[in-house]
Image (cartoon, coloured by chain):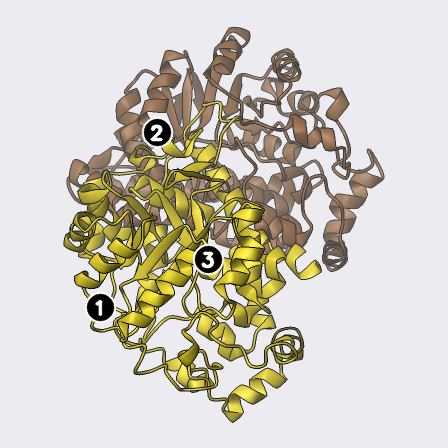
Amino acid sequence: MSALDRCYSIPDLREAARRRLPRGVFEFVDRASEDEIAVRNNRDAFHKIRLMHRALVDVSGRKTETVLFGKPAALPMVIAPTGAAGLCWHEGESELAKAAAKAGIPFSLSTASMTAMEKIVASGGPAVGGRLWFQLYVWKQRELSHALIERVKQAGFEALIVTVDSPVGPNREYNQRNGFGLPFTPTLRFILDMMRHPLWVQSVLLKYFTTIGMPRHENYPPEYQKSILSGVGSREALRADSLNWDDIKRFRDMWPGPLMLKGINRVDDAVRAVEAGLDGLIVSNHGGRNMDSAVATLDVLPDIAEAVGHRTTLILDSGVRRGSDIVKALALGAKAVLTGRATLYGTAVGGAEGAGKAISLIKSEFDKTMAYTGCRSVDAITADILFGERGANRWRDAAD
Amino acid sequence: MAALDRCYNIADLRAVAQKRLPRGVFEFVDRGSEDEVALRNNRAGFERIRLKHRALVDVSSRSMATTLFGKPISMPMAIAPTGAAGLCWHEGELELAKAAAKAGIPFTLATGAMTSMEKIAEQAGPSAGGRLWFQLYVWKRRDLSHQLIERAKAAGFEALIVTVDTIVPPNREYNDRNGFLLPFYPNLRFTLDIMRHPGWMANVLMKYLTTIGMPRNENYPEPYRTRVTSRDPERAAVMRQDSLSWEDITIFRKMWPGILMLKGINRPDDAVKALEHGVDGIIVSNHGGRNMDSAVATIDALPDIADAVADRATVLLDSGVRRGSDIAKALALGAKAVLTGRVTLYGTAAGGADGAGKAISIIRSELDKTMAYTGCNSVDEITTDIFFGDSQGNQRRDRVGAMA
């Protein structure tokens, strides 16, 4: 596939995705919220960290493998849950899951995905060497969410991720402008947009039409499982602003496997989560897509790692675009990162092959950064490779 | 040469080079890696430092001359090793070496050069008043590297520089895009690129083709001295550097009685280790921001390394030097001299030895003026006393600033 061959980095894949996708879909994936301050800050935080390369350590046998929740991962990276994978490619979630299984890293399926979880288990589950995590948005009618958890357990997912940073719908103004809201109401602008992308219409949209019809949220309970065109059941039922620690207690009782909270930003919340028996915490600001004033995840990571890093598995997302970003997150206390956009760009360009390309680009960058900094194993990545004093760095960042 | 006469600073020379060179060659010389963060930071590191000018000191007899490894130099600068000089100008390494000899500063020949070391030694070596250093990339097959060291010794090179910051090939995505990779295989884009630069084609490429044929890495051992167009897969394998270790340095130290330097030291602990291995010089470098894109700016890393080394070895700095004032800043923070790579390559591309000489003289004039402004009559007088803010506080602020 020649478009993929010409991509040498995630920014290249992003550019190729921009050309391929209707603007409404691309911006839904690519952009953030309001003035897009959080998304810029996420990137800046990574750029601010300077590494010192290490001379003359024989790193020829270095390994990028690690262990997450007791099982091996080829790379300290996991595919983040994303709602729009199925609009980037026909059954994009399935493609992503396949790519993840092939690369030896876990894949997270979003509640809002357009491919049924059972299908993902078949195409990217343990049978093909995959590790599957499920991300949960909690509905107002809790019994429906509880039923969903049972369905996830039945399907054989290894871990459950509860997203706790989306109590309200974010201000993603471009979605309104593009006519790309859920429920999806095609405006004239969106129809023109699609007409400019016939390849997408043919290879994504028409494939759905000729099989299942309009894409649906396949993991929603039957009463909500309407096509994305429908407004039924979405707005009011999806209200999550009553989600609280009592729910987490309940989920803990229901879910024997690894249980994670996604969207922890505060040290006190992290401590409370660990006390509530969570196995993992994902330091996330939803890729800068929710609260636009959110602190960069890399900036809050050190404090959280200091407080709970030894008692839980800390994972970071939001802003990872380069392999060196993983090195920085690990040096500051994370055990792994999630990538959302990076692998979605790849999916949009070439399905499983494109997602695989994205993973391999990041893996190669990660491997090189390990080599430069003299780290032969993932465990060897510590704050020792950071330039400057960690405290000074942190406070300076906070002051900025 | 008219184009050179219109160049008043390095940025001007860069602009001429950009016009003259095919895009693939220019970007290979000019750019960094990945998102080019390190490249920008190297410059920002220098630009952050503020100097105070000194009033009413008689500086009319000031001098930039100093000594480096016991021998005189006309200014605290040496030419860095660069692989692409021979693509900027026909036998560009030789042009650079001649310019350096004329200006009274050392020249470093890269392992990847396209002109043989013997030719450089003959035409720009001690007999022509030049000081020659040789930069070593270590091949997987160590015996071949050891042979190369013997060859450099026999050719009369004064110093050996072992590059230690290139253990894996960097991500220079523009090279892939431009079709500018080694082994070099011209894609359509590069072919069109060359055709848009007939001057370069006539003066550089055709001169090789009509004499030696396609340029080769003339200093590679015989089995690997292939055309730059060769796609021999074994060549990539021998270039693997990720097993390079301190044991190699021990061996090189035994083999090389002359000046031995490590290029690409970023950490004070590595600098101390280098001293324990008997090296004479340490070059604080991040390869011009061309390798690890998250690398700390060298001017930010320098003070701690200079403290750790004290007077036990000669500390040099490179990466980001574009103005004479940058040299003053590096010297104040503990370097004995700097290396320039791109600066003198831009000059070479713009006008061969004349252009390289022009680049050196521009930097020289800028350093001279900076010394005059700050009241320094000799390079030994350049200390952090000329910095704004107390020297320690300033350093700290710079370091923290580098993080932010």
Q: Chain of mark 3?
A: A
- Quick one: B351 or B342, which is closer to the camera? B342
The kind of residue on which mark 1 rests is Leu
Q: Determine if marks 1 and 3 fall on one subunit.
A: yes
The colour of chain B is brown
Q: Which residue lies under the disc numbered 3? A: A155
Q: Are marks 2 and 3 in contact (CB under 8 Å)?
A: no
Q: Nearer the viewer, mark 1 or mark 3?
A: 3
> Can you see residue B350?
no
User: Dot 2 lies on which element?
Assistant: loop
The chain assigned the colour yellow in the figure is A
The kind of residue on which mark 2 rests is Arg
| Image location of residue B178, percent across then percent down | 66, 53
| Image location of residue A373, percent across then percent down | 41, 33
Residue A184 appears left or right of B369: right
Q: Which residue lies under the disc numbered 1? A: A243
Q: Which residue lies under the disc numbered 2? A: B267
Is residue B262 placed above or below B367 in the rendered structure? Answer: above
User: Dot 3 lies on which element?
Assistant: helix
Residue B65 appears left or right of B195: left
The residues bearing labels 2 and 3 have C-alpha atoms spaced at a distance of: 51 Å
Q: Nearer the viewer, mark 2 or mark 3?
A: 3
| Numbered badge on residue B68 | none
- Quick one: B287 or A139, which is closer to the camera? A139
Outermost residue, right side: B210
The kind of residue on which mark 3 rests is Ala
Q: Which residue occupies 46% across, 74% down?
A: A217
Outermost residue, bottom side: A188
User: Crowdedness of circle 1 by 10 Å Cα count: few (<14), some, many (20+)?
Assistant: some
Q: Nearer the viewer, mark 1 or mark 2?
A: 1
